């Protein structure tokens, strides 16, 4: 993956807002961003901006999870692990998603 100086500037601004720039080996063509227990994949665009690939996710053991309805409630599920999608976890993911989207809009 080749990043332009515009991409690098956006990543630096995200870092200054408290996001960690991380790599996810299964998604080498994307840039990972993480804060707390949440992460997202960013797709570099030819314009020098980024788009969010897929949806931000709650991490379980460092892996992306999917929110699913199972039996008696909603859970974040990753491989064989699952966590209850508690109000606190949902709020953390919603805040992460909103702050990332806002940060990308401001840096575009």
Image (spheres, rainbow, N blue to C red):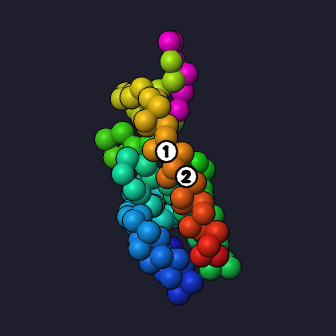
- Which residue appears at 44% of the width and 61% of the height? 33
**Residue 93 x/y as whole percent:** 49, 44
Q: Can residue 60 be seen in this view?
A: yes
Question: In the image, which residues are magenta?
Answer: 67-72
- In the rendered image, the vertical position of residue 1 relative to residue 64, given as above or below: below
19 up-or-down from 88: above or below: below
Residue 25, quarter of the rendered image? bottom left
**Main SS class of the magenta portion in the image:** strand
* Disc 2 target residue: 97
Residue 82 higher or lower than 53, as above or below: above
What residue does disc 1 label?
Answer: 93
Residue count near mark 2 (Cα–Cα under 10 Å), binned few <14, some 14–19, many ≥20: some
Question: Badges 2 and 1: C-beta atoms under 8 Å apart?
Answer: yes
For numbered disc 2, what is the local secondary structure? helix
Q: Residues within 10 Å of mark 1 (few under 14, many from 20)?
A: many
For residue 65, say whether it is visible: no
Residue at the image position 43 percent from the left and 49 percent from the top: 38
Estimate the x, y position of residue 95 in percent, counting from the top left.
51, 49
Tally of numbered discs: 2
Q: Quadrant of the C terminus?
A: bottom right
x, y percentage for residue 66? 51, 36
Q: Residue at x 44, y 78 (%)?
A: 12
């Amino acid at each position: 993956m080749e990043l332009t100086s515009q991409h690098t500037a956006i990543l630096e601004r995200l870092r200054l807002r408290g996001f960690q720039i991380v790599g996810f080996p299964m998604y080498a063509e994307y840039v990972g961003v993480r804060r707390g227990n949440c992460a997202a994949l960013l797709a570099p665009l030819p314009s020098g901006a980024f788009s969010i690939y897929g949806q931000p996710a709650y991490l379980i053991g460092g892996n992306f999870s999917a929110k699913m309805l199972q039996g008696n409630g909603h859970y974040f599920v990753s491989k064989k692990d699952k966590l209850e999608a508690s109000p606190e976890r949902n709020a953390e993911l919603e805040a992460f998603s909103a702050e990332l989207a806002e940060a990308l809009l401001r840096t575009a």
